[in-house]
Image (spheres, coloured by chain):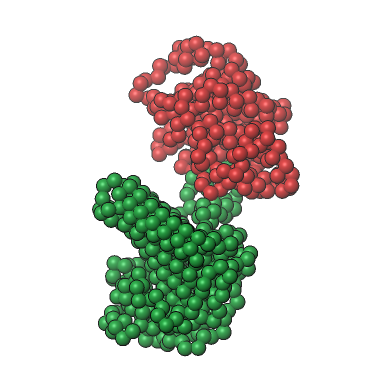
Chain colours: A green, B red
């Protein structure tokens, strides 16, 4: 741990100049924050979990410390109770940035979830990750190992105490074994005063499949640094996400899909809207390594900019090191389309009603593809009510 | 006989170029009128201006059931009973046809239960049930888009319908299908203005009156005999008869749809 601490000391906090942090202000310096040794009082589960029917297990990590960990269909262990936790071969380099170094240096708990080979989860394992202690910096760690030919469902819900400035830096390490399938959904609903920087890695074995979803709603700065490594031949990855930024939120997505194995395929599909002074960032790199022949990959990022001061940055990239591949990207940034509004108005809908229908339609394409079922209703309602308030308060037309 | 649509002295320009040059027109309730004309004569512009599309300089007047249209917004005109079936209906991904029609009928004050029943019944009749859950005009062929427009018309029950080239881009079977659907909707509460470039749709729906528009004006109006004249001699025959100058090649502006009239081709 000393080594990690030294890396942490040596690195400076992101300034927004670094390529990986462009457009983003990291405004929660470590100097004003403290670690947590006793977890604060847990928050309730919030509106989204209530909509989910049954679950097959429940983990609660409060201020980086595990207070509950049980599952009927997977083996769940507290990292702090394991003599030799599998964190030494973590897929995220300690010196990736100051936050990953901080995580390596200060993370003191988390869970290891082992899904037995050939098993099929009947319902999602729910992981609640909450930050509650004011002015804290916490470092939850989650490892999911999906055994060969198993099928796992995992839902993660992030929340934080209302109005409290705090920093959460989780690391999520998802390892999908040969022939295994993982469906993993995040609902990021932390308070607008909190900063949440998630580093998430997916490693896919031969013929493994992951479907990863993200619903980005909360945080002053909410950042998802996601990397999917398609290591095994024939593996496939789908990443779908939606976000809606309001107030002075920054919702920041840094996604790298790296194809190593042959005949691998991937799709990234992210849609978001920003209003008021909010901004969103998407940088997506599709990388196809030298031996990854017969790969197909695509990424799409569509953004609605609903207010004059809102901003969306969308930067798709391709890096292709072999020749027999199919790949492409699509990206757009703009207001609601005039043609669409005109068509709906010409059938009698007034402009604000037409706008509401278009917002629903815009996000419905993503909501239909979320990897865990059951949350469509509340997610759709949350986005819709944000848009309606923005309309009623005159921030969007 | 009361008048559904009345247009008086309508002149329209786009970026300084005059398209419509003093147009007068009356479509009574219960009648179907056809508006025919060569490309670039201003037929579609007439539809757009009446519907309320922005970007046109307009003078003159238009009344729907006696109400001045040009003082109203697009949606207000629609709520008054105006409906345009678009030549190229906009694709709106994610907004399902059924959901859209529920909103539009609600806006028109139709009780939701009645709206649901009406949508179901009309969808059965038009064989459109499979389209209800699909996104508006998305992944539809040219013919399916036009049928979806006519289907919406049957559900929304306008007082005045502007049908902008519902026959273009369709094969002959599809033309017959949409034409018969329009003919079925004939009613004493509805006026229809059917814009078309070709006379073939008139084999399946018989208009009460045919207007010929050339160079931004209605140059002749009459009965079925006008369609026969066009069928045999084209617009040049009409120009000859009326002593109008022949179209100059340079004036003719072809649109992609003219090159692909038998193909579902979208621009």
Q: Residue at x 40, y 86 (%)?
A: A32
The reply, left or right, for residue B33 in relation to residue A206 is: right
Quarter of the picture holding the N terminus of chain A: bottom left
Residue A227 visible in image: yes
Residue A176: quarter of image: bottom left
Residue A313 visible in image: no
**Between B53 and A297, the one nearer to me in the picture:** A297
**Between B45 and A251, the one nearer to me in the picture:** A251
Q: Residue at x 41, y 54 (%)?
A: A207
Residue A55: quarter of image: bottom right
The reply, left or right, for residue A14 in relation to residue B226 is: left
**Between A62 and B144, the one nearer to me in the picture:** A62
Q: Residue at x 39, y 60 (%)?
A: A204
**Between B87 and A218, the one nearer to me in the picture:** A218
**Count of numbered circles on the image:** 0
Q: Residue at x 54, y 60 (%)?
A: A120
Q: Is residue A351 above or below residue A256?
A: above
Place of residue B64 in the rendered image (x, y in percent of width and height, measured from the top left): 64, 36
Place of residue A147 in the rendered image (x, y in percent of width and height, measured from the top left): 46, 64
Place of residue A17 in the rendered image (x, y in percent of width and height, measured from the top left): 28, 71
Place of residue B263 in the rendered image (x, y in percent of width and height, measured from the top left): 46, 27
Q: Is residue B152 above or below residue A338?
A: above
């Amino acid at each position: 741990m000393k080594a990690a601490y030294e890396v942490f000391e040596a690195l400076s906090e992101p300034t927004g100049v670094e390529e990986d942090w462009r457009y983003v202000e990291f405004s929660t310096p470590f100097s004003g924050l403290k670690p947590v040794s006793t977890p604060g009082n847990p928050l309730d589960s919030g509106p989204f979990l209530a909509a989910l029917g049954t679950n097959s297990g429940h983990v609660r990590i409060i201020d980086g410390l595990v207070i509950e960990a049980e599952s009927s269909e997977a083996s769940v262990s507290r990292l702090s109770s394991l003599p030799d936790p599998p964190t030494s071969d973590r897929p995220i380099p300690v010196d990736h940035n100051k936050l990953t170094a901080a995580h390596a240096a200060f993370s003191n708990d988390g869970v290891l979830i082992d899904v037995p080979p050939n098993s099929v989860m009947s319902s999602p394992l729910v992981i609640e990750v909450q930050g509650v202690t004011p002015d804290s910096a916490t470092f939850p760690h989650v490892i999911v190992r999906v055994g060969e030919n198993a099928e796992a469902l995992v839902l993660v819900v992030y929340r934080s105490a209302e109005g409290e400035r705090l920093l959460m830096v989780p690391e999520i390490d998802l390892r999908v074994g040969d022939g295994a399938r993982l469906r993993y959904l995040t609902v990021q609903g932390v308070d607008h005063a909190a900063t949440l920087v998630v580093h998430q890695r997916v490693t896919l074995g031969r013929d493994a499949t992951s479907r990863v979803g993200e619903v980005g709603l909360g945080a002053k700065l909410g950042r998802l640094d996601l990397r999917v490594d398609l290591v095994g031949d024939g593996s496939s990855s789908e990443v779908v996400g939606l976000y809606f930024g309001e107030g002075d939120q920054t919702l920041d997505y840094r996604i790298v899909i790296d194809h190593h194995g042959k005949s691998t395929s991937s799709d990234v599909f992210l849609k978001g809207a920003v209003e008021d002074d909010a901004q969103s960032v998407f940088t997506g790199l599709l990388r196809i390594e030298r031996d990854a022949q017969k790969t197909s990959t695509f990424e799409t990022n569509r953004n609605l900019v609903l207010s004059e001061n809102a901003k969306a940055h969308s930067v798709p990239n391709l890096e292709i090191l072999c020749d027999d591949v199919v790949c492409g990207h699509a990206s757009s940034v703009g207001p609601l389309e005039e043609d669409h509004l005109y068509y709906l108005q010409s059938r009698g809908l007034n402009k604000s009603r037409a706008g509401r229908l278009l917002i629903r339609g815009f996000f419905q394409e993503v909501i239909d593809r979320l990897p865990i079922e059951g949350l469509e209703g509340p997610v759709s309602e949350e986005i819709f009510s944000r848009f309606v308030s923005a309309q009623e308060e005159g921030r969007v037309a | 006989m009361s008048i559904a649509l009345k247009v008086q002295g309508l002149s329209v320009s786009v970026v300084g170029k005059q398209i419509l040059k003093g147009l007068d027109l009356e479509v009574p309730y219960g009648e179907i009128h056809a508006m025919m004309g060569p490309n670039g004569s201003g037929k579609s512009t007439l539809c757009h201006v009446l519907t309320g599309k922005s970007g046109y300089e307009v003078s003159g007047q238009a009344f729907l059931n006696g109400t001045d249209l040009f003082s109203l917004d697009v949606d207000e005109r629609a709520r008054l009973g105006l409906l345009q079936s678009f030549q190229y209906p906009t694709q709106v991904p994610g907004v399902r046809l059924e959901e859209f029609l529920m909103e539009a009928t609600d806006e028109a004050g139709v009780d939701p239960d009645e709206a649901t029943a009406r949508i179901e019944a009309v969808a059965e009749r038009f064989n459109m049930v499979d389209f209800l859950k699909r996104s508006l005009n998305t992944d539809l062929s040219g013919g399916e888009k036009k049928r979806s427009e006519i289907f919406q018309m049957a559900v929304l029950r306008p007082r005045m319908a502007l049908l902008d080239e519902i026959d273009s881009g369709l094969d002959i079977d599809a033309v017959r299908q949409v034409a018969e659907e329009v003919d079925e909707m004939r009613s004493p509460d509805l006026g229809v203005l059917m814009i078309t470039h070709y006379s073939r749709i008139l084999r399946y729906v018989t208009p009460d009156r045919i207007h010929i528009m050339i160079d931004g004006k209605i140059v002749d109006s009459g009965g079925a005999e006008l369609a026969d004249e066009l069928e045999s001699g084209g617009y040049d025959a009409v120009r000859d008869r009326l002593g109008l100058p022949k179209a100059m090649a340079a004036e003719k502006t072809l649109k992609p749809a003219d090159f692909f009239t038998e193909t579902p081709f979208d621009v």
